[in-house]
Image: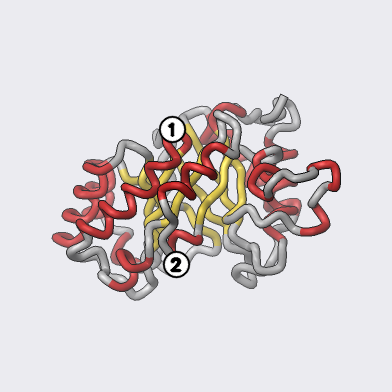
Amino acid sequence: MASVDARGVRVGVAGWSVPKPLRRPECGDKTLLEQYAEIFRAVEINSSFYRRHRLATYERWSASVPDDFRFAVKIPRLITHEKHLVGCEDPIAAFMSDVCGLGGKLGALLVQLPPGALFEATAAHQFFRFLRGQTSVAIVCEARNPSWFEPEVDELYKELAVTRVYADPVPRGCEVRADGNSEFAYMRLHGSPRMYYSAYSAEYLEELRSKLAAQSKCGQVWCIFDNTASGAAWADARLLQELAFRDAPPHV
């Protein structure tokens, strides 16, 4: 059985609202984020999609977690769903001026596009080129329209170091081709068959552990559980982390 390189794997949840059954009395006055960071090494901030957070808020979050903890932050819907990547220089600059409060703990920026968003070459090139000029951290894109899964998009991603998100369930026509040479991978698990609610089976998570083991030999891989509506994400993430790090616990 292939082993997982713990240095290259980050398992986490979309948000750190610790379910009540997992909250520990001994944590005292620790915030939910501080409690979360004692279990996982990464988290995805989705609230940034809906509303702006102040620089001081990001700074406070950064100060609440260990040095080896990393945040992924979702790009605001104003940019991805309302402006459709067009004419977004000012909103991007404003977003980056806030999120820089995370400092070196900013690990990735998530660009999630609506299912109806078709790939428009000019708009996509201008958007990703400007965003890449604002940051050196990983940029990951979860497109949900088949037009984004063509060779032209592959070339754009390669040019600007953008990572295509592996999502489950996979929208029809949006299958990610295997790339054993990728140095960065990002998985978003939304729950299946019922998105955002369903838990994953132990068998699925064991298969996922094998994928993490393979990718961790090439570079970094993030695995974020987004099936949070029923609380399944926490149990799934905990089990996957136990499977992945049973020979090398992430916190020692």
Residue 104, numbered label: 1
Alpha carbons under labels 2 and 1: distance apart: 24 Å
Residue that appears at 79% across and 59% down = 20
Q: Quadrant of residue 172?
A: bottom left
Residue that appears at 55% across and 29% down = 67
The residue wearing badge 2 is 50
Q: Amino acid at mark 2?
A: Tyr
- Secondary element at tag 2: loop
Residue that appears at 80% across and 52% down = 22
Q: Earlier in the sequence, mark 2 or mark 1?
A: 2
Q: Amino acid at mark 1?
A: Gly
Q: How is the image coloured?
A: secondary structure
Q: Nearer the viewer, residue 60 or 35?
A: 60
Rendered view: 217 above or below 221: above
Residue 149, image x and y in percent? Answer: 32, 59
Number of marks in the image? Answer: 2
Is residue 18 rendered to the left or right of residue 162?
A: right
